[in-house]
Amino acid sequence: MTTKKAPITGPDIVEIGRALYGDTWKSCLSRALGVALKTIQRWERDENKPDDTMIAILQHVVERRTIEIERATTHLMRFTDRPMRYDRDEIKASRLFGDAA
């Protein structure tokens, strides 16, 4: 028996979008998902919710951005002796978008 996950909410969309793209998250996320900006705004206001397929696409976008950031971090480390301010294992063990700094 599988348990149904809680539905994603507007605040969830905002948190994920900001974590992925910063202040320009709405337009960037709409492009990444291939949906209209108005769709993102409706999700943000809880007027509508992304369906299961869109949630799967969003998960893929998060995974892809995580890989891009890891690559950028590795690239940057070639130019500095300064250690990163976070522990990757700690981040993996923490909430996906919690305070990891």
Image (cartoon, rainbow, N blue to C red):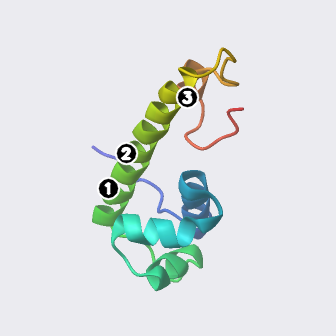
Of labels 1 and 2, earlier in sequence is 1
Give the amino acid type for the residue marked by disc 1 in the picture.
Ala
Q: Does residue 32 appear anywhere in the picture? A: yes
Q: Does residue 4 appear anywhere in the picture? A: no
6 vs 66: above or below:
below
To which residue does mark 1 refer?
Answer: 56
Element on which disc 1 rests: helix
Q: Position of residue 99 (x, y in %)?
A: 70, 38
Of labels 2 and 3, earlier in sequence is 2
To which residue does mark 2 refer?
Answer: 64
To which residue does mark 3 refer?
Answer: 76
Q: Position of residue 80 (x, y in %)?
A: 64, 20
Q: Position of residue 33 (x, y in %)?
A: 36, 66
Q: Does residue 76 appear left or right of residue 85 in this picture?
A: left
Q: Dot 2, how many residues are within 10 Å of its Cα: few (below 14), some (14-19), or many (20+)? A: few
Image quarter where the N terminus lies is top left
Mark 3 vs mark 1, CA separation in Å: 30 Å
Give the amino acid type for the residue marked by disc 3 in the picture.
Leu
Q: Dot 3, how many residues are within 10 Å of its Cα: few (below 14), some (14-19), or many (20+)? A: few
Element on which disc 2 rests: helix
Give the amino acid type for the residue marked by disc 2 in the picture.
Arg
Mark 2 vs mark 3, CA separation in Å: 18 Å
| Quarter assignment of residue 51 | bottom left
